[in-house]
Image (spheres, helix red, strand yellow):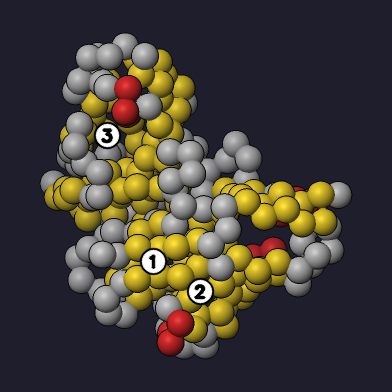
Amino acid sequence: AQSVSQHNHHVILSEAASLELGCNYSYGGTVNLFWYVQYPGQHLQLLLKYFSGDPLVKGIKGFEAEFIKSKFSFNLRKPSVQWSDTAEYFCAVTGRGGSQGNLIFGKGTKLSVKP
Amino acid sequence: NAGVTQTPKFRILKIGQSMTLQCTQDMNHNYMYWYRQDPGMGLKLIYYSVGAGITDKGEVPNGYNVSRSTTEDFPLRLELAAPSQTSVYFCASSYMVLDQPQHFGDGTRLSIL
């Protein structure tokens, strides 16, 4: 079955610490991968996406993610977090092409950054 | 630029009541989606539409219905509200399938009592 696993339910960091959020997926065929962020009380916003090409993708606000096909992983990283990064982060996957518009989300990782 | 607009923002329903959650987008996107978000469960796709007149079931369609008579509007209907439908509902849209939902509405928080 298609699924996305996010390893950490809640991550607590101090400002300036480095961040890595794990994401593994199970999906047959070629995939598109996404990270979304949901700030408290707000709707989801796209952080970054991978369709093809360079497996290291850079997104907004200094975030980046690396697609490792052999590990079915798409981990999110940021060298130095800020208090304003406190949010919930969702990894998502969908199949490439076809008529299916089904985006599979992970359960999310809540990030709390202490000032 | 309004983007994706959902109404209402909050609603409390009694068991067995019906209601329609409204969603409209002004970006001329072909694809529209309804998700529900439950605590610790991420987002689950309820229904989606690839264009006016075309809808399809997602992962959790039971208890819901949708229609897509225009490109702009994609209402979600609950016919017989049940406590299990207490959730936050998000509508989203995208221009084409490879672009996937990049534009989400602000959500509707629905409580069934």
Can you give x and y, in whole percent of width and height, for residue B39 in the image? 48, 39
Would residue A73 be found to the left or right of residue A3 on screen?
right
In terms of depth relative to the viewer, which is nearer, A108 or B36? A108
Using the rendered view, name the quadrant where residue A79 is placed. bottom right
Can you give x and y, in whole percent of width and height, for residue B7 in the image? 40, 27
Q: Quadrant of the N terminus of chain A?
A: bottom left
Question: What whole-number distance in Å separates the C-alpha atoms at marks 2 and 3?
Answer: 33 Å
Using the rendered view, name the quadrant where residue A48 is placed. bottom right
Question: What whole-number distance in Å separates the C-alpha atoms at marks 1 and 3?
Answer: 25 Å
In terms of depth relative to the viewer, which is nearer, B1 or B4? B4
Q: Residues within 10 Å of mark 2 (few under 14, many from 20)?
A: many
Q: Where B73 sits versus A46, above or below?
A: above
Name the residue at 26% across, 33% down: B76
Q: Where B92 sits versus B13, above or below?
A: below
* Chain ID, mark 2: A
Would residue B27 be found to the left or right of residue A108 on screen?
left
- Residue projecting furthest to the top: B14
Foreground: disc 2 or disc 3: 2
Can you give x and y, in whole percent of width and height, for residue B6 in the image? 41, 33
Helix, strand or loop at mark 3: loop
- The amino acid marked with disc number 2 is Phe
Residues at circles 2 and 1 in contact by the CB criterion of under 8 Å: yes
- Residue ID for mark 2: A74
**In this view of the protein, can residue A50 be seen by the observer?**
yes
Would residue B109 be found to the left or right of residue A115 on screen?
left
**In this view of the protein, can residue B98 be seen by the observer?**
no
- Residue ID for mark 1: A93
- The amino acid marked with disc number 1 is Val
- Residue ID for mark 3: B75
Name the residue at 34% across, 67% down: A94
Q: Where B23 sits versus A44, above or below?
A: above
